[in-house]
Image (cartoon, grey):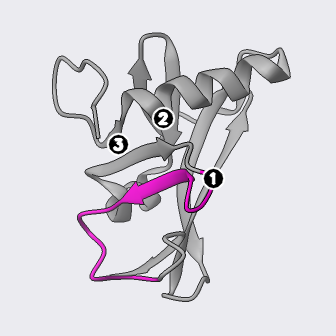
Amino acid sequence: MTQATQPQQRGIQLSEAALRQVKFLRDKQGTDFCLRVGVRQGGCSGMSYMMDFEDASKIAPQDEVFDYDGFKIVCDRKSLLYLYGLMLDYNDAMIGGGFQFTNPNAAQTCGCGKSFGV
């Protein structure tokens, strides 16, 4: 896992591969979206990760915003309690590829890697 160049530790870490992939996906949509990352109840381990593109006009004053060379990652403060220190990586392998979450706050993680328990 290679981390993007960062002047200081950020609450949500992004590998170079993940940054390239989210920029690629955003550019395909033709709109300057930011990436919202969060958690919700559910999934096989109790909580599941969520991420989706969102218009920057929906960033709320209470949201935390992390800037990666002009690409913004947004997370609500409640979710950040569970995600602080998260490393978001991307792997393009045919089997087991896609976005991968490495969460230092997770006490357990399900086999699919998309949900966790604290």
Spatial CA distance of label 1 from label 2 is 16 Å
Q: Which of the two residues, 101 or 2, is positioned nearer the viewer here?
A: 2
Disc 1 + disc 2, Cβ < 8 Å? no
Q: What residue do we see at 32% from left, 62% from top?
A: 103
The residue carrying mark 2 is 18
What residue range appears in magenta? 94-110
Asked whether residue 33 is in view, the answer is no
Q: Which percent across, then down, holds residue 111?
A: 48, 81
Density class for disc 3 (Cα within 10 Å; few <14, some 14-19, many ≥20) is many
Q: Please give left or right for residue 104 compared with residue 74 in the image.
A: left
* The magenta stretch spans residue 104: yes
Disc 2 + disc 3, Cβ < 8 Å? no
Secondary structure state at the residue bearing disc 1: loop
Q: Which of the two residues, 37 or 98, is positioned nearer the viewer here?
A: 98
Q: Please give left or right for residue 23 compared with residue 10 in the image.
A: right
Q: What residue do we see at 53% from left, 56% from top?
A: 38
Q: Quadrant of residue 6?
A: top left
Q: In the displayed structure, would residue 110 be above or below residue 98?
A: below
Spatial CA distance of label 2 from label 3 is 12 Å
Q: Which percent across, then down, holds residue 74?
A: 52, 37
The residue carrying mark 1 is 94
The residue carrying mark 3 is 12
Q: Please give left or right for residue 21 compared with residue 4 in the image.
A: right
Q: Give the mark nearer the N terminus: 3 vs 1.
A: 3
Q: Which of the two residues, 30 or 81, is positioned nearer the viewer here?
A: 30
